[in-house]
Amino acid sequence: MIPIALFATIALVTFLERLWSLRRAKVVPASYVVKVTDMIRQGRFDEATKLSRSRPVAAARIIEAALDARDRSHERLKERIEEVGRREAAELERFAPVLGTIAAISPLLGLLGTVGGMILTFKVIETVGLGNVASLAGGISQALVTTFAGLTVGIPTLIGHRWVLSRVDSLVLDLEEVAAGVLEELEVHREAGAA
């Protein structure tokens, strides 16, 4: 029961941290994206870079990388954006494996407690016999309580894990959309400059 309780605490803290960190305003703040896109559209690259450096969010780090690499070829610029995007996506997925592991292990720990309780029950049967039902209750109770505890931790943690992965996927799509928009604006400026 102690490991199950420990895993329950870790899962709750991890989920709450991810809930806080995966807010859209902390990853792709709409006001920042609109403002920096307007700056890029107007050719105010230094201001856009300065604004991006002042914002500690994933979208700003991707846009800053794009602005720093804007003089490179289209392919190299796109590679740089993808490289930073992969790093940001990995950061968004941080701690998701912890939730997945706890969701898988908690029911197994409950099953381990079930087996332990059944072993205890059979030892009582061996020494006392089947005549005294009260002496069997302790082992059966242990078996049921640990199974219940393991499932009680595992099921919500699995739901939390799936939610985190879904949220990450949604935010990564938003980041890709922002990156594509910035790439398009930079290409428009490059073509206008070449003309």
Image (tube, helix red, strand yellow):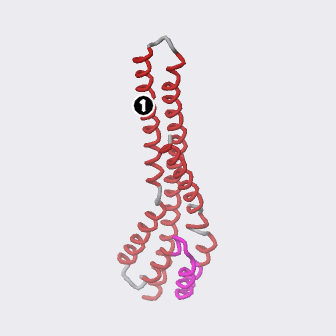
Residue at 57%, 85% in the rendered image: 42
Residue at 38%, 83% in the rendered image: 72
Q: Observer-nearest residue: 120 or 56?
A: 120
On screen, residue 168 above or below 80: above
On screen, residue 71 above or below 126: below
Q: Is the magenta region chiefly helix, strand or loop?
A: helix
Give the x, y percent position of residue 82: 40, 70
Please say whether residue 39 is one of the residues in the magenta stretch: yes
Residue situated furthest front in the rendering: 127
Q: Observer-nearest residue: 45 or 56?
A: 56
Residue at 41%, 85% in the rendered image: 71
On screen, residue 155 above or below 92: above
On screen, residue 143 versus residue 28, left or right, reads: left
Q: Observer-nearest residue: 12 or 90?
A: 12
Quadrant in the picture for residue 126: top left
Magenta segment, which residues? 36-60
Give the x, y percent position of residue 4: 50, 43
Q: Secondary structure at mark 1?
A: helix
Please say whether residue 55 is one of the residues in the magenta stretch: yes
Task: Please identify the quadrant where the C terminus is shown.
Answer: bottom left
Give the x, y percent position of residue 140: 50, 24
Residue situated furthest right in the rendering: 31
Q: What residue sits right under mark 1 in the picture?
A: 116
Q: Observer-nearest residue: 67 or 90?
A: 90
